[in-house]
Image (spheres, rainbow, N blue to C red):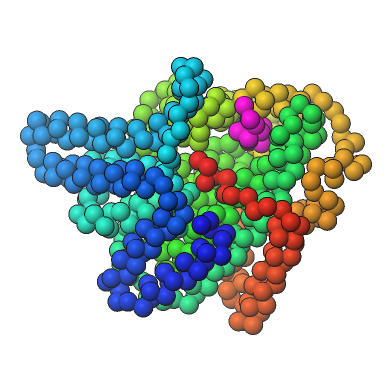
């Protein structure tokens, strides 16, 4: 059961019916029961691994909370030992299942092993780490009710691919029942429709061309790779944001607000700015639980760059096993280090070209530059291997074949001219929505201010357009969400 399946929305309707049917103080039980049911329907194996992890992290958190009251140095050392052991036990299953085959095959040259990988392990592992760390630091108190703690980990809208929640932000919303709010319910529905638009009108269409090029990295060079790189950057963003919007919409119908995961990332004016806007819940997690504990930027520039490198190396490893993911993370660390080291040179170039007198042009140029560097990293991220990714980037820069934009070459890779028109128009709608949001005007709020009949007509038109011109319209297979694989 995926977030785009009919069965999920039948399931969601049942959860909403019972959630608003029973008394407020018991509504968290509906979410708990529904989350367990969703996990079993979505993924029938590996549940026992998740169950063991929940029980162990719950017990460790309770014991750390108990030791918090002990003031003697001996008990503080016990507390630290328990915390360290609990982190190791929490991380070990993820590390083995996500990196085991790579270590066995590429490093130890041993036969691979078939691992049982629980659904959402990369995301709920981060939840458990942050929960244990915050209890150890005294920021929050351990949840005494094991069912409520399990609900925090299992909450069905975000278990598959985030956003990664913090206990202090989500727990109170889960355990306190919410009254039915027509406006919030409609906002949730609106987010789900927008998610379907992003998925079927942009992400899955882009994936057709992207897959054709990346499956044959040595056959397609130059502007083919450039086009595929641009489309993959758009595909990944649209796909990930689509799932996030659907998750936030489903939670919003219950009156629960999940954290924002994106804030117009491709309008960033630097790579550092990009990471303040992209996958915000993961970026902030890496900042708070790796970068800052290492010393952040408090210990001089050299230490800052080392901490940055370690943090983004961890980000690469979290995304997947293999040299290409590590290289992708290190590349982003190198981008930010280079940007910091050359800041003075960049300012002098701006002064020489008098770009300060044209701030709009300067901002556009910076955004194009950031998009290009991020796109190059995405090509390595998407390629079958690090060597293939490097070759593709090299071929994109070296081979000159701009005539493919003037003949029918791009139409021979899975997308006809009609599909290209739909894709370009849909991407334009996304860009317009992002631009207005950057200006502080959220299009969704303006829609909610319209009369009911206009809103209804707009929703119906959007749904019919997705059904006719989206994935269903041209017979493409529905692609699973990309970040589900991480």
User: Of residues 337 and 317, which is closer to you in this image?
Assistant: 317
What is the magenta range?
A: 372-385
Against 332, residue 147 (above or below) is below
382 and 186: which one is in front? 382
Q: Residue at x 65, y 31 (%)?
A: 383
Secondary structure mainly formed by the magenta segment = helix
Residue 303's image quarter? Answer: top left
Please provide percent x and percent y for residue 290: 38, 33
Q: At x 73% / y 29%, what residue is drawn? A: 217
Nearer-the-camera pick, 422 or 471: 471
**Membership of 380 in magenta stretch:** yes
Q: Does the magenta stretch include residue 433?
A: no
The answer to whether one can see residue 259 in this image is no
- The reply to whether residue 114 is in sight is yes
Question: Residue 122: where, in percent of width, then height?
Answer: 43, 41
Q: How many marks?
A: 0
Query: In the image, 116: left or right of 449?
Result: left
């Amino acid at each position: 059961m995926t977030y785009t399946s009919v069965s999920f929305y039948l399931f969601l309707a049942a959860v909403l019916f019972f959630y608003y049917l029973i008394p407020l103080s018991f509504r968290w039980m509906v979410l708990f029961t529904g989350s367990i049911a969703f996990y079993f329907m979505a993924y029938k194996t590996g549940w026992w691994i998740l169950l063991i992890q929940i029980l162990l992290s719950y017990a460790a958190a309770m014991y750390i909370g108990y030791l918090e009251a002990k003031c003697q140095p001996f008990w503080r050392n016990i507390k630290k030992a328990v915390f360290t052991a609990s982190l190791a036990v929490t991380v070990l299953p993820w590390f083995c299942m996500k990196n085991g085959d790579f270590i066995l095959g590429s490093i130890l040259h041993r036969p691979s092993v078939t691992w049982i990988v629980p659904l959402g392990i990369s995301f709920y592992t981060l939840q458990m780490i942050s929960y244990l760390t915050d209890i150890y630091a005294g920021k929050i108190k351990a949840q005494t009710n094991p069912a409520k703690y399990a609900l925090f980990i299992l909450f069905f809208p975000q278990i598959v691919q985030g956003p990664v929640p913090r206990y202090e932000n989500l727990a109170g919303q889960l355990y306190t029942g919410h009254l039915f709010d027509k406006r919030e319910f409609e906002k949730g529905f609106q987010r789900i429709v927008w998610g379907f638009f992003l998925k079927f009108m942009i992400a899955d269409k882009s994936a057709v061309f992207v897959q054709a090029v990346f499956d044959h990295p040595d056959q397609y060079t130059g502007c083919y790779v450039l086009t595929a790189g641009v489309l993959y950057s758009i595909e990944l963003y649209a796909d990930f944001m689509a799932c996030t919007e659907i998750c936030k919409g489903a939670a919003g119908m219950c009156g629960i607000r999940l954290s924002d995961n994106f804030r117009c990332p491709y309008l960033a004016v630097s790579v550092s700015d990009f990471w303040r806007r992209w996958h915000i819940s993961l970026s902030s997690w890496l900042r708070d639980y790796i970068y800052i504990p290492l010393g952040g930027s408090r210990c001089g520039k050299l230490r800052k760059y080392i901490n940055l490198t370690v943090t983004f190396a961890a980000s690469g490893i979290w995304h997947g096993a293999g040299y290409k993911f590590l290289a992708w993370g290190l590349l982003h660390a190198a981008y930010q280090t280079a940007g910091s080291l050359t800041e003075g040179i960049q300012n002098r170039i701006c002064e020489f070209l008098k770009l300060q007198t044209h701030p709009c042009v300067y901002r556009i140029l910076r955004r194009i530059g950031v998009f290009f560097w991020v796109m190059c990293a995405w090509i390595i991220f998407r390629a079958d291997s690090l060597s293939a990714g490097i070759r593709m980037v090299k071929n994109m820069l070296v081979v000159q074949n701009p005539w493919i934009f003037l003949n029918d070459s791009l139409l021979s890779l899975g997308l006809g001219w009609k599909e290209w028109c739909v894709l370009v128009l849909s991407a334009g709608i996304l860009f317009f929505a992002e631009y207005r949001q950057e200006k502080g005007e959220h299009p969704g709020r303006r829609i909610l201010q319209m009369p009911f009949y206009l809103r209804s007509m707009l929703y119906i038109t959007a749904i019919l357009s997705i059904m006719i011109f989206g994935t269903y319209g041209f017979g493409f297979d529905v692609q699973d969400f990309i970040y589900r694989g991480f």
